[in-house]
Structures are given as C-alpha cells and as structure tokens.
Image: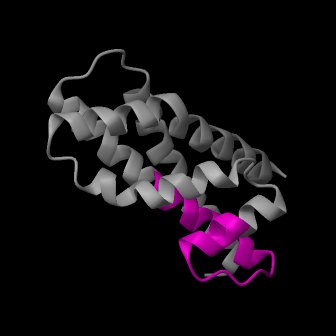
Amino acid sequence: MSIEDRWRQRFQNFEKAYTNLEDAYNLTEYSELEKTGLIKTFEFTFELAWKTLKDLLEFEGFEVKSPRATIKQAFQTGYISDGTGWLDILDKRNLMTHTYDEETSQEVVELIKDKYFALIHELHKTLKDKIAE
C-alpha cells in the first residue's frame, strides 16, 4: 500500500469514528454509561485523528515520529489552527483513560463538549476538503 493510500484509508476510519463521536456529542444529557461512551469514542477518534495527520504529513514528505511532533507539524502546515488545544488533548489523555469516578468523567465530558469536539470537527472538515482535491 502506498503512503497516499494509507492516509486516505486512515481518513476513512477517522471519518467513521468522527461520525460516531458527533452522534454522541449531540446528546444533551448523559447517563454514566453514555458519558463513558462519549469519552471512549473521543479517545478513539483523537487517536485516529493524529495518526491520519501523521500519515498525511509523511505523504507530503515530513518526518514525524510522535503525536506531539505530528501536532506541531500539522499546526505549522495549517492543518490545525489551535496547536495549543491539540497539545492540551494530548496532555489530558491520561485523565481520559482514568475516568473511574463521576467527578472526573464529568470534567472530561465538559472538555469534550466545550472545546475538544470543535477541534476534531475542524480537522474533519479540513481533511475532508483535502481528500476531495
């Protein structure tokens, strides 16, 4: 599989995850199970987002080895507009992974609803436009 095919295939997986995240995001109230579902769907979508960016950047000739390097290069290249926000998601991954108590899960849900979903949404639109070129 070529590098171009790999990033396009990764985008398709990212798009499926994004659609599930969007459905979860659009709920107005959450049971504990739904909160967990939103958080886990966000984690999965974020992982596919940065890996899609990594594949795209490598296709374009950049060498990026880590999520942090990928985010920084994606910001410099203009694929994302809020590098600080993306790095914040990266730094909060451990918090998301350990959402065992109600207070922590509520904090993470609020971050997703108030800030993080918008970043993923913007990237989805950018990459969708890119793939249509």
Name the residue nearer the viewer: 32 or 100: 100
Residue 51 colored magenta? Answer: yes
Q: Residue at the location (58% across, 43% down)?
A: 120
In terms of image quadrants, where is residue 49? bottom right
Residue 105 colored magenta? Answer: no
Q: Position of residue 127 (x, y in %)?
A: 71, 51
Name the residue nearer the viewer: 77 or 53: 77
Instruction: Report the magenta residues as a range.
Output: 46-72
22 relative position to 124: left or right: left
Q: Residue at the location (16% across, 33% down)?
A: 33
Q: Position of residue 102 (x, y in %)?
A: 17, 34
Q: Main secondary structure of the magenta part?
A: helix
**Quadrant the N terminus occupies:** bottom right
111 relative position to 51: left or right: left
Tally the numbered discs: 0
Q: Residue at the location (38% across, 52% down)?
A: 43
Would you say residue 117 is visible in this rendering?
Answer: yes
Q: Position of residue 86 (x, y in %)?
A: 59, 53
Q: Position of residue 18 (x, y in %)?
A: 50, 42
Would you say residue 13 is visible in this rendering?
Answer: no
Is 117 situated above or below 5? above
In terms of image quadrants, where is residue 124? top right
Q: Residue at the location (25% across, 40% down)?
A: 104
Is 48 situated above or below 106? below
